[in-house]
Amino acid sequence: MPDVYETDRYVGEYLLFHYGKAKEILPWQDGPVDALDFPVRTVGHFSLGKVARALDVGCAVGRSAFELGRTSGEVIGIDFSKAFIEAAEKIGNGDGLICQRLEEASEVSEVKVSAPEGAGEGQVSFEVGDAMNLRADLGSFDRVHAANLVCRLPEPRKFLARLPDLVRSGGELVLATPCTWLEEFTQKENWPEGRTLDWLKKELAGDFELIEVADEPFLIRETARKFQWTVSMVTKWVRR
């Protein structure tokens, strides 16, 4: 798996993506403001009410895990990137972080980010892990969240095959993916045949019922004048 997610550049971009204020990310008046707060919006697809346990796989620097902590007694966030997890843990400990924001060329500015107020920091823990080989003793969860993960895994079916063990009967699964399959992450033989939604239905049908399909845009700032605007497909499932 590429190690770009261990670099200072990507840690800074994702800290801003997860925790930055609107004007810190997008200073342009006519920019796509509806694409901000993606890690919050994906968690919003879970049903209302409180649950005992939640899992965020591919949690990056942790914002969705903290949002899950608002309604979950225990949250575990897992990511393959050690740098992302270290950043998430510092945020969870109440330490504000200074992230480098590239303006252009070699010019950078600094932005301080911190955990969202009231997001249940004390209930959330983080660990480094491989989504395709999650530790056996994780247990089961009422809610499992995985945003923009499956199309970045070398063998995504391994992750999908583990989900029935992770989600309790009646529990909910929210998967978000921009369906941007690339050979640098996933060899072609492991891509879906046809559309990603049809592939997910096939892989999950035996254990999950599809409840909802929605589109959620997201925005990642690369420089002051260059952004990644992408639309992720969000699917919500209930464990049979």
Image (cartoon, rainbow, N blue to C red):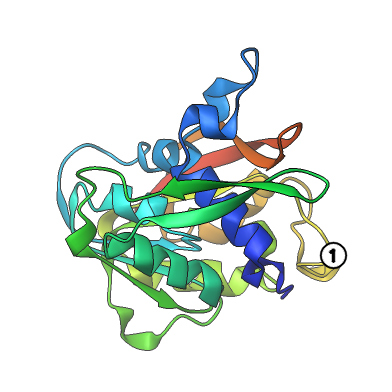
Give x and y (percent) for residue 213: 51, 34
Q: Residue at x 68, y 58 (%)?
A: 151
Q: Quadrant of residue 8?
A: bottom right
Give x and y (percent) for residue 221: 66, 40
In the picture, the quarter occupied by the N terminus is bottom right
> Could you say which is closer to the camera, residue 33 or residue 57?
33
Q: Is residue 118 left or right of residue 225?
A: left
Report crowding for label 1: few under 14, some 14 to 19, many 20 or more residues within 10 A (C-alpha): few
Q: Residue at x 77, y 61 (%)?
A: 191
161 relative to 108, above or below: below
Q: Quadrant of residue 11?
A: bottom right
33 relative to 137, above or below: above
Q: Quadrant of residue 168?
A: bottom left
- Type of residue at label 1? Glu
Query: What residue sits right under mark 1 in the picture?
Result: 183
**Local SS, label 1:** loop
Q: Residue at x 70, y 74 (%)?
A: 3
Q: Is residue 41 left or right of residue 219?
A: left
| Residue that lies at the very extreme toward the bottom in this rendered image | 136
Instruction: Count up the numbered dots.
Output: 1
Give x and y (percent) for residue 87: 45, 66
| Residue that lies at the very extreme toward the top in this rendered image | 30
Give x and y (percent) for residue 147: 52, 52
Q: Is residue 192 left or right of residue 47?
A: right
Quick check: can you spot residue 148?
no
Q: Is residue 240 left or right of residue 177?
A: left
In the picture, the quarter occupied by the C terminus is bottom left
Q: Residue at x 19, y 62 (%)?
A: 123
Quick check: can you spot residue 223?
yes
> Could you say which is closer to the camera, residue 126 or residue 190?
126
> Could you say which is closer to the camera, residue 99 or residue 50?
99
> Could you say which is closer to the camera, residue 90 or residue 228?
90
